[in-house]
Image (cartoon, grey):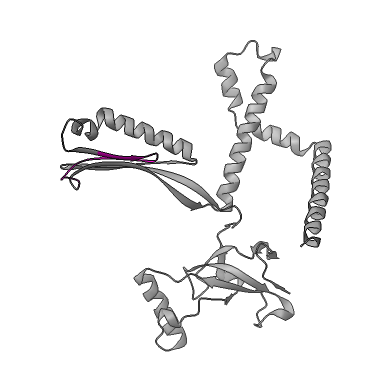
Amino acid sequence: MTINRIGTKFHYAGITYTIGDTVIANAESEYEGLFGTIAEIRDGNDQETDNDTPDIYCTFIPPFDPEEIKTLESRFSYLYGQKKKLKDITLDIVIMAPEMITILNSVPEIKRFGVYEVREEWISEDDAGITIEFAFDEAQAKRILTQMVNDEKQNGVTSEWCSDPRFKTGTTPLFFESWLDGEYSSNHYRAAVYRHEMCMGYDLFEAIGKTYIDMQLRKHFAEQIECWDELENMTDDQINKMIALPIVPQRIRKHLAENAYLRDAYWESVSEASFALVKTFKEGLDNE
């Protein structure tokens, strides 16, 4: 069996290997420390090796650090009994045994998302500093930036410079800068929003999703009990403490999982939607 389609899963010894997964070569391999992706998996009669385990084909990223490159070259030079440079070492489509790699649980379809860095930098004579905050949407980042600049104009070096005839400013919706003309290198302030692409491991993504669902369950719990007579002898502080208990989302999850009617209705809806989606997709293929 040979699989090489992105997203296709292969189960072996209790571990799921997915084409496209990010991996790191571990101490069982001469490629130890290198990062790569799974490009193909072969098992049974399709294997190129005589290994009892599947052949997992990985493509590795060349290291950039001189010390890491030196270590890799020394390792392969010793292994092959002759001098090896980085360019001589195969990094593309390398056959690995399962025990030689560790999956980093990255899922290409969901691991990338935008994050906004709000960076404030200043230098004034002998004083300098940097402040950094992060936001997950542009509006929130712009709010942070606006607050930073406002505080700067009231209490920062900009407030000290504004009466100086050499005082200059430059702005865009996501950028503010002020300085003293002719002394930019020693007297300037800058605040700006920068957008970055971040990679998130599946475990962290799952944890964030669970946290959000727990928040929703707490909200629904609070809405459900809001007018109950059972709360009449409890203070607002006691009610809020009860809503914040870890057992609240846990207990609701348990009851949802044990609700056979809800479970059947869920899978019936999934089945109906899946049938309609496949039908729509096939109709689209026929019209191509």
Q: Nearer the viewer, residue 29 or 152?
A: 152
Quarter-wise, where is residue 222 in the image? Answer: top right
Q: Nearer the viewer, residue 137 or 263?
A: 137
Task: Tell me, yes or no, if residue 131 can be seen here.
Answer: no
Quarter-wise, where is residue 64 in the image? Answer: bottom left
Location of the C terminus (image quadrant): bottom right
**Above or below: residue 222 compared with residue 182:** above
> Which residue is farthest bottom?
82
Examine the structure image and report whether residue 30 is included in the region drawn in magenta: no
Q: How many marks?
A: 0
Location of the N terminus (image quadrant): bottom right
Residue 220 coordinates in the image, percent (x, y): 67, 27
Span shown in magenta: 169-184
Examine the structure image and report whether residue 176 is included in the region drawn in magenta: yes
Quarter-wise, where is residue 258 in the image? Answer: top right
* 204 left or right, relative to 264: left
* 202 left or right, relative to 149: right
* 268 left or right, relative to 118: right
